[in-house]
Amino acid sequence: TATATATATAETTKSEEEDGLEKKLRPLEVVKELDRHIVGQGDAKRSVAIAMRNRWRRRQLPEDLIKEVTPRNVLMIGPTGCGKTEVARRMAALGDAPFIKVEATKFTEVGYHGRDVDQIIRDLMDISMNLTRKKFTEKRREEAKALVEDRILDILTGPASQKRDRDSFKHMLRDGLLDDTEIEVDVPEGGPGGDKAGGMFSIGGDQNNPNVAAMADFLNRMGGGGGPGGSKKSPPTERKKMPISEARDVILDIELDRLLENVDLKKESVTAVEESGIVFIDEIDKICSSRDFMSKSADASAEGVQRDLLPLIEGTTISTKYGNVNTDYILFVASGAFHAVKPSDMLPELQGRLPIRVELNGLTEDDLYKILTEPVANLVRQQIELIGTEKVKLEFEDDAIREIARMAALLNRTVENIGARRLHTVMERIMESLSFEAAEMEEGSVIKVDKDLVKQRLSDVLVASDLSKYIL
């Protein structure tokens, strides 16, 4: 009956999680959340919201159909500074799914010195492992807290003490009267939750290499007296003296580690990656070379990386130190500016594996004004809060903000279009002397930024000869 109850509780928890996820990942909710931080780009937000919702929908399907439904990967195309990477960053914060953002330019093709694309999945597994550990830790925290109290009372009164003594100590402990009392605690060497794989043997080479990791693990088990049967011996401990206020956290970590020993974290995190992992590959246009030059490129991080990405996106099995990971159902979102090359310059097979195309628009003057005023942590608010730390009040008039947006749009047209990043350049130019002087001002002073001040600060920008400073 106890097993049945535990199973029922697990089922209930799972269904509650699904319900929470169902409400959280509705496309309308996702778009609303993205609107709080990103201006415009409705198409990109919608396609990302649909892709995330489809992950949830797939999990509701009958067993025989789940295997057939694969995610529709997305390719975002748009000029620099229009919000492609920001969409991905905010997307990761929404779902509790394992998410990794990588730059395609960091990888080289297999056979050259450098990182190959399999490393993406290994890094994603590390992230998933941390997420899974955190999730289970939160679930067991209350249970561990109760155990901590018992452990401290055992140390204070001895395990065979009378109930009356124990209760009086318990009240004193809860009221915080014993916080400064020093007690002796057995702590695992290297600290609780520490990397016990560091044990007796350390092997050179890349720790992400599954063969190296497996060898180190095996040697440490043998050295720790685990034996080939794998019966785990408890790690060596050392006795430390510390006040109860500090001992609480230390014992909590030890108890949590003990509770998590019964959970197969590796299996859980592999499942999380396979079923709901998301990989965002940025700067994918930088590994394309134009078809006009048919000569074979000698660049180790160009065409070859595209070829290596094909099996990864299509679905393959990658060996990691936590076990084999199947990439069939991982969602891939790629993005690139495609200034120098066209999306059709990518390998045709790679184009076919990124079926959903979303074009992001360049930013207009109105968009830049909205970026300065609408997002929760907009640039204007950031500057006001930063100057506010000096007890000085900073005020921006609406005309001034409009002028900043106009100047940024003008510079994007005349010099080089770097999108919303141009606002940083313009804003820093205006704030340069104000930031410098703010620390010397009296408390309660007010600084007003109006249209004339903006024009005055940016006057030399309009002189065509002095544009070099703004070319980033």
Image (spheres, helix red, strand yellow):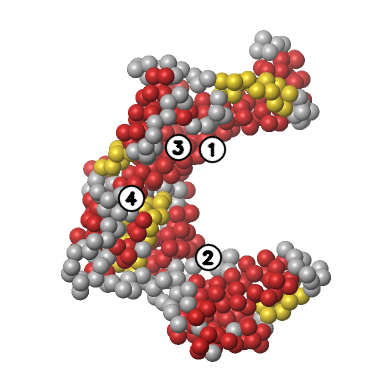
Give x and y (percent) for residue 120: 35, 49
Kindly report the distance in space between the C-alpha atoms of the residues bearing marks 4 and 2. 39 Å
Label 2: how many Cα within 10 Å (few below 14, some 14–19, many 20+): few
Give the residue at x 45% y 85%. 414
Residue on which disc 2 sits: 36
Residue located beneath label 4 in the image: 114
Q: Secondary structure at mark 3?
A: helix
Q: In the rendered image, is residue 235 in sight?
A: yes
Q: Position of residue 420 (x, y in %)?
A: 49, 73
Residues at badges 3 and 4 in contact (C-beta under 8 Å)?
A: no
Q: Amino acid at mark 1?
A: Glu
Residue receiving disc 3:
12
Q: Is residue 143 left or right of residue 433?
A: left
| Amino acid type of the residue that numbered disc 3 sits on in the rendered structure | Thr
Disc nearest the viewer among 3 and 4: 4
Q: Which mark is residue 138?
A: 1
The reply to whether callout 4 and callout 1 are in contact (CB within 8 Å) is: no
